[in-house]
Amino acid sequence: MRGLLNDEDLYIDLLPQRTFLSYAKQPGQLRAEILAHHRKFENAICVVDEIQKIPSLLDEVHELIESIKMRFILTGSSARKLKREGANLLAGRAYTYHLFPLTYQELGSDFEIERALHVGTLPILWESSAEDAREFLRTYVETYLKEEVAQEGLVRNIAPFAHFLDVSAAGCGETVNYSNLARECGVSVKTAQQYYQILEDTFLAFRIPAWTKSSRRRLSTHPRYYFFDTGVTNALNHVLGDPLNPVERGRRFEQFFVTQLLASIHYSRLDFQVHYWKTNHGAEVDFLICKGRQIKAAVEVKSAANIASAPLNGLRSFLNDNPKVPAFVVGIRQKERKTTGGITVLSWDKFLSDVLFEL
């Protein structure tokens, strides 16, 4: 972040303990420092990193926006504390952006799909060796448990939550059955639901809701959750040091695709929502790209080289009910073609760079 700022801009990091304590004791200190800086550099931007650590500073930010039209960039790794303490969220005065791990477009010629599936696309990892990347991810998981959960008091007992993280990572992308999950983790159903909310609030995972609008079939209503980065999921699953087996590789490719899909939708400000489709008989489609109540595309994700032999029963079942919806199968290094059923097969990056913007 600092490397993107001009010399006249002001950067405040709340992570160091000394800085945190100083502003926590005297929130008004922020206003005094910014006013002094503004007198010297009228067009400066102020960046406050880890703003969720001291929610009360948002009142000072609000006042400075109103009084001197100060421009701020406020970053954070958790929304939970802001919500819990009823912080001033600057409604109508701030734009909200979500940052994802690096996209394949941002990595450009450095991008490698197998590396992305194994260690993910967190920025620091693409300047590291494979071994350093694995060690970083192992440490990251431990640090997350220690700092984000334990220190902020998001859960009272860290042990059940740590077990929940392992179980939820093993089921990344699967339809959640809260009762089964709660039983496996030894917690109540309500606690299991709260744990998933913690993952969302700390941006460690995101929810893909089920598509439930059907007059012909009974559809699943339970959500699916994907961790925000494939490398973090592999670290939680303890498979960083080994080659991914075909099942693991398929799951990580699906996870990678949906994170890249959501990043493309968010960064391009496309008015799309992403759901999955599953009947009570087990037929399913990985992703539906929707605009309100209209389904714009159905997408199945396959990592196998020979997609022609892959079962597409779920997609065909969906098309029986929705024959006018464009259907796609995205894979790795696939030449674009159509199957006899009218399903388009193509490479995942071709879908994201071209087809998505034509829906």
Image (cartoon, grey):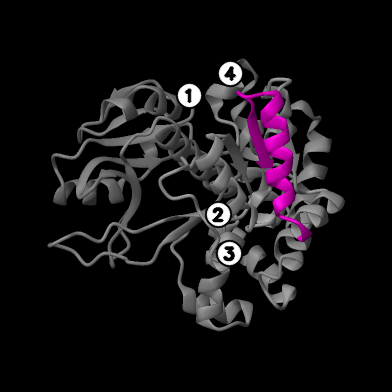
Mark 3 / mark 4, whichever is N-terminal: 4
The residue located at (20%, 59%) in the rendering is 213
Please report the bounds of the magenta region as a residue range. 25-48
Q: Amino acid at mark 3?
A: Ile
Give the distance between the C-alpha atoms of the residues marked 2 and 4, in whole angstroms.
25 Å
Mark 2 / mark 3, whichever is N-terminal: 3
Question: For residue 78, which numbered disc appears in the image?
Answer: none
The residue located at (60%, 44%) in the rendering is 229
Mark 2 / mark 4, whichever is N-terminal: 4
Neighbourhood count class around disc 3 (C-alpha, 10 Å): few under 14, some 14–19, many 20 upward? many
| Numbered disc total | 4
The residue located at (78%, 62%) in the rendering is 146
Give the distance between the C-alpha atoms of the residues marked 1 and 4, in whole angstroms.
16 Å
**Are the residues tagged 2 and 4 within 8 Å (C-beta)?**
no
| Residue that badge 1 annotates | 333
Question: For residue 198, which numbered disc appears in the image?
Answer: 3
Q: Amino acid at mark 2?
A: Ala
Q: Amino acid at mark 1?
A: Arg
Rendering coords of residue 358 (x, y %): 27, 25
Q: Which quarter of the rendered picture does the C terminus lie within?
A: top left
Give the distance between the C-alpha atoms of the residues marked 3 and 4, in whole angstroms.
33 Å
